Amino acid sequence: MRIVFVNPRCDIYPPLGLCSLSAYLKEQLPGVETVLVDIPPATGLRAAAALITAARPDLIAITTYTVAFSDVVEICGYLKERSSTIPILLGGPHITSLPGTLPATADIGVIGEGEATLLELCHCLSEGKLADPGSLASIRAICYHGPEGVVTTSERGSIEPLDSIPPPDLAILNMRWYTARRMYFTMKGNFKGFVLLTSRGCPFNCRFCQASAQWGRCRYHSAERVVSELERLRTLYPKLDAVNIIDDLFIGDRKRLREIVRLIREKGLHHGMVFNVNGHAMLVDEEVIGLLKSINVVQIAYGFESGSERVLDFLKKGSVTVERNRRAAALTSAAGIGVGGQFMIGSPGETEEDFRQTVAFIAQTPMSHVHVSATTPMPGTELWEICRGKGLVSDAMDWRTLDFGNPDTAALLYCNEECMPYERFNELKSEVKQVADRWNPVPSLIANLSYWQLYTPTEFVRRVFMGLNRMRHQYVNKIRQKDQ
């Protein structure tokens, strides 16, 4: 049996979820073959379908993110044109949150954590029963097409303990691409880096985040497992000098954090290596900062979200305050660790005064990187339900309007028209960008070139010229400062 996994939007972060599924199947299903097809954004969708079928699949499994769901639906249509008999499975956050959006050209959706479910589906395929509604009805956590619409089966419990899932299968990745020396957006300088995922889920439940919908209760890999994966990376790829730990909240379990740090230092795995992690202001104190500093963490990314107490309270449901965010940033900076600040603008109920408070927070808080995005409702979140109640979103909408990470999005959904006209919001967006760019490192021309695979030719040229323009402004400002 040959399973072809599909990452519909390749970027610098490897699809570790698909790597985990591959590892689990190889452990549980002797003789299975797995292949990953990464689809760069510049690839036409019909050409993407050709790449997938050229991999000779017995089963196609595509991960789905809402921002790329329109592309996935189109690719499924082209796949069915090429071969109507190859089963197509969809998994990931989008189909988990909205199983009813399973397109007619996809056969089955996998809801939530996929390892055990995919294994059952593979057994079903090997027995020739994957098209049998009776067999599908007995498999938990899937959706499929029935006579009267999409059928969703009962929930499946989470895998316990998380360590029982084998380490991600790196053999299916193009490691030359994923470990290329480049400027990670969260770090200064060019690093030969890779990523680790050491938990699933988040102990917090912010109104805008899909983590809870996708993973349910937060679970952690043991300290021993985390350090063994780091050892494996350093053994297989000795030239690596950076690891980005992409957990929603790496520092969520302090006892585990202490043990991870102890083992890393005991084994000397921090020598010649820097780390980037995600934090939370309410969990950061002198001890946590000291632990992270001792293993060469060079940046902690925080979801500061807003400089307005009222908006922050809405987005994060009272789990943090603006003052605690300021304190976390100050503690982090004082230790010589970079502060990665993530912010959202255009939240429901946000006024221009709220916006001004966010601008002031960014301007007054030294950071190593700032990322500002428009508040966008994702399926499965409370924010989605709020916007659904306003008639702004639905299960049959144009998913491209939610692609907040794509600068080419022509009509990004805006969910705060009642408090700030969209025209005024656009004017203020450029203002916050100028303030944020004060802190952001300017990618070199070489750094820009390292991302060529991720963009259309037009977008690539645009980004190169933007980078060159920012470098020119930076140089001019330095000359002016010297003259003064």
Image (cartoon, helix red, strand yellow):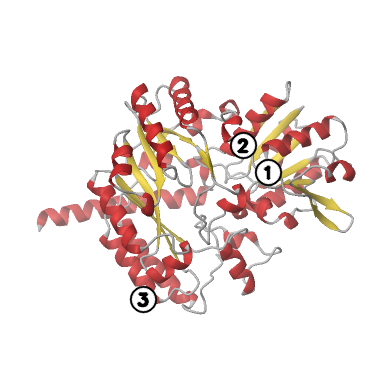
Amino acid type at image mark 1: Gly
Q: Nearer the viewer, mark 3 or mark 2?
A: 2
Circle 2 packing at 10 Å, graded few (<14), some (14-19), many (20+), is few
Q: Is residue 255 left or right of residue 90?
A: left
CB atoms of marks 1 and 2 within 8 Å: yes
The quadrant where residue 200 appears: top right
Q: Amino acid at mark 2?
A: Glu
Q: Is residue 297 left or right of residue 336?
A: right
Tell me, yes or no, whether the two marked residues, 3 and 1, touch with CB atoms within 8 Å: no
Amino acid under disc 3: Glu
209 w.r.t. 64: above or below: below
Q: Which residue is mark 2?
A: 160
Whether residue 179 is visible: yes
**Alpha carbon of mark 3 to alpha carbon of mark 1: how far?**
45 Å
Query: Is residue 465 depicted above or below 293 in this figure?
Result: below
Task: Using the image, tell me which numbered label, if any, was put on residue 353.
Answer: 3
x%, y% of residue 52?
70, 36
User: Could you tell me how far apart the alpha carbons at marks 3 and 2 are, in whole angstroms?
Assistant: 47 Å
> Residue 265 location in percent, x, y?
33, 27
Q: Is residue 268 visible?
A: no
Q: Residue furthest left?
A: 484
- Disc 1: CA contacts within 10 A as few (<14), some (14-19) or many (>=20): few
Left or right: where 79 falls relative to 318: right
Q: Are marks 3 and 2 in contact (CB under 8 Å)?
A: no
Instruction: Give the image location of residue 339, x and y in percent.
Output: 32, 49
Quarter of the image with the C terminus in it = bottom left
Report the disc number at residue 157.
1
Which element carries disc 3, helix, strand or loop? helix
Of callouts 3 and 2, the N-terminal one: 2
Residue 477 in the figure: left or right of residue 183 = left
